[in-house]
Amino acid sequence: MAEVLDKVDAVVVGMGWAGGIVSAELAKAGKNVVGLEKGNHATRSDYIGVKDELRFDNRFEIMQSLKGDTITSRNEIDDTALPIRTMQDNQMGIDLGGASVHWAGASYRYWPYEFEIRSQTIERYGEDKIPDDMSLQDWGITYEELEPYYEKWEDTAGISGEQDPMAPERNKPWPNPPLNETPSLKMFKDAATNLGLHPFQIAAGNMSQNYENPDGEKLNACMYCSFCTRAGCDFDAKSDPLATVIPTAMRHDNFELRTRANVRRVLYDDDSKEATGVMYVDETTGEEFEQPADVVVLAAFAFTNNRLLMLSDIGEQYDPKTREGLIGRNFNGQYNSAFHGVRGFFNDKQFNLYMGAGALGAAVNDYAADNFDHSDLDFIGGGAIELRQYGFAAISSSNNYTREVPSWGADYKAESLKYAHSALRIWYTNIAMSYWHNYVDLDPTYKDEYGDPLLRITYKFGSNEKPIAKFGVEKCREIMEEMGADIIEEDEIAEEFDHVFSGGHYTGGVVMGDDPETSVVNNYLQMWDVDNLFVVGGSAFPQFGGHHPTPTIGALAYRAAEGVERFLDEGGQLATAKSKTMRA
Amino acid sequence: MVKKGSDNNSDEKVFSRRDFLKTTGVAAGGIAGGALLGGFTGFQFGSDQDSESAETGTGGETAEGGEGGAETPEFAARTFFSRQEDFAALAAATERIYPEDDNGPGAIELGVPYFIDNQLYGTWGTNGTDYRMGPYEPMASDTHGRQEKLTRGEMFLLGIRRLREYAVEEHDEEFVKLEPDVQDEILRAFESGDVEVPGMRAAAFFSLLRNTTIEGVYADPVYGGNKNMEGWKMIQYPGPRMGWMDEITSEEFVELEPESLRAYQGGGI
């Protein structure tokens, strides 16, 4: 029998950016909050002195072990799904701070067009522009409405950036100036300028200088050590919850953190349509606990937010055959149709590619959102074209060889040594759409270590994916040619989704909107059907934007935190349902 | 100061690993009994006969803050592969994937066979963080990543044994005794999936072998490969450092003698 604990104002499930933000804001407002994190109580010390490529990039030290729990995957709604068994193919964040600890730091706002993508596409190109398979919908919030929350997240995180010439003018500059410009970034910018494009330095969650955020948390200037992505920062120089919102929350006695607390159910009263708390397992002792609360906030990764609602039998599961039900509908993300581009090999140049920072890079947004005319194009939306200097250690540097040589043997060795520091990649971070045939539900066969069904992902490319990827490759090539690469290799457009979940950008399934017919949560991420249940995170994205997701997750989390606080004080449904959003 | 590693192109280097295997006969599967045992006594891949400095890999380094030095003894030994013949075939295969050449040492001299042996003994080799519940459908899909019931360690063992068996079937000779171009031909047959291997696709075995070999060349020497940081020297990688604040905007390529994780951690406890 589960031990029933004392009731609190709010219980927050998941301690990444989303859960950390909600916890910090509620703690500051004096609410009694319990934060539950499935993984360990990681601290900065866990990342000091461990700059080890094999351990973090190849053995995935800070990703979730799949031993007891993974996902299953298939392409077609009648296929049998298979489990994703290795971390090579499924990288989910774990431990305090969640996936945010290993993020790179690229910080883009989504575009005004993207939040109203259905309405504005129809307005500009007519309804016929939207393909039949696409369940394209507005977010139920505008850019202008979300902007103050973007600003709040950027200030908390201390983002280092400069005004993107294509983007809406900012109310105030980024909190910190942009990161340093390296020779490869300068080459990219010069080439883009020559082509009439508008390059800028990517806004980064890596500090360009020492910074104190509005909550009083101090961050240090980044040293460009290169151990950002898939690693934790050893220097409090990357904007992550461990450096910001989690210490802010923990400064308050009315916030309690419990790690190794694996939430398995939302407790739900069907009569009153209320969540009454959560049930979790202490992963150290195996004991079960019930944590009652006035408000339940699910703030886990999109996989987990979806699965917890399904396991708890809250809301109606989406069925692609009848197109009824909403939970699991519009699951989306940047699968292997995103990040196509080109690689350029330079015979007479060596760049310091072993130095870098996660979001150190240059980009153009001339081909983002609806910044270019789509009248004669066979796709909707766009993305950034980026050149990044993450900093590459030796194993990944050994991948710089052309397709002219095999992947092993003497020729491989010679060529990979020659180009180790002389190959640059440019890619397109294109938008990813939702379709009626892509969704998540519970797998009928495969179980987790407790006997609960795994989450099953059904995903195949829709009509947008290949055309937009092909367009991106062409545009990347133009820039790489202008940069003067001696050999340019284009990525081959993927034929179909390959069941590799290594990109981390998986969203939707519990989507937001202003119409309960097509959305599960309102624009405070409060469930339409369950007033005291907030589902916060990437799970709210109706479709993916044309950029990396983190700032939008951060902004929505600040919006949700405001909503939870209001609900605790006033109760009730915070938004008025409209029936503006048309369902595809 | 970092002590310069052995010069692999020096005239002192009179024979290759391959010659060593052949001349000692250690790796030949046909030798039996006491002769075989006797052969093993002095046999250690990576214990270079003509260079003391190549033996510094496991114990430490002479980098600033480091411990140990050129006299540090070599302790590399098999802890996963039980059969010497399998390990010799693995070693020969890794050497074809990353051969010794004018650029520098190959997989054997870099300690890669021991790196792989170490990896297979531990969590990774036993798939300790993988989802391991059935039903298993190892051949059901081309695109669902690893689906084998076998662990990585088992895949290596069975894959290497099939490699040896295939060499005998096709060429009537142990893999280790075949000419390099014939060994390459056999590896290509596995790479392209033309060989039947129980419980796995031949191509899956090959990609595991290929990728783990490259990891062994370039991972930190603490794991048993990249001996004396020779892999890093070849690829001009300096190893982990506090940061590159002063160098990040440099127009010139900054080439430095590498330092290892041990040096980065301060050289000891």
Image (cartoon, coloured by chain):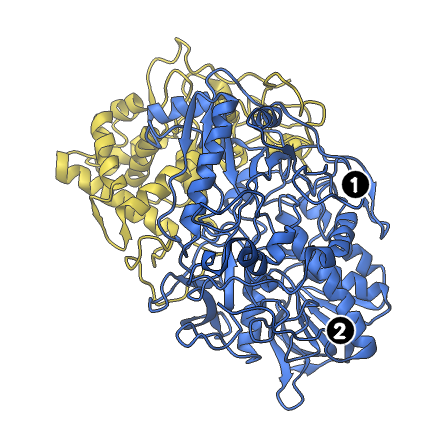
Chain colours: A blue, B yellow
- Secondary structure beneath dot 2 equals strand
Horizontal and vertical percent position of residue B221: 52, 32
Q: Is residue A368 above or below residue A541?
A: above
Horizontal and vertical percent position of residue A157: 75, 48
Mark 1 chain? A
Residue depicted at 26% across the width and 35% down the height: B36
Q: Is residue A81 above or below residue B5?
A: below
Q: Is residue B169 left or right of residue B246?
A: left
- Secondary structure beneath dot 1 equals loop
- Residue A257 visible within the image: no
Horizontal and vertical percent position of residue A181: 67, 27
Residue depicted at 74% across the width and 74% down the height: A574
Label drawn at residue B36 = none
Pick the residue in front: A247 or A303: A303
Cβ atoms at labels 2 and 1 below 8 Å apart: no
Please name the amino acid that badge 2 sits on. Answer: Ala
Residue density around tag 1, few if under 14, some if 14–19, many if 20 or more, within 10 Å: few
Residue density around tag 2, few if under 14, some if 14–19, many if 20 or more, within 10 Å: many
Residue depicted at 58% across the width and 29% down the height: A196
- Residue A323 visible within the image: yes
Pick the residue in front: A550 or A265: A550
Quarter of the N terminus of chain A within the rendering:
bottom right
Q: Can you tell which quarter of the image residue A7 is in? A: bottom right
Label drawn at residue A173 = 1
In the picture of the structure, the residue carrying the numbered disc 2 is A10
Determine the CA span between mark 2 and mark 1.
34 Å
Depth check, mark 2 against mark 1: the one in front is: 1
Q: In this view, does A412 lie to the left or right of A504?
A: left
Q: Is residue A16 above or below residue A456?
A: above
Please name the amino acid that badge 1 sits on. Answer: Pro
Mark 2 chain? A
Q: Can you tell which quarter of the image residue A360 is in? A: top right
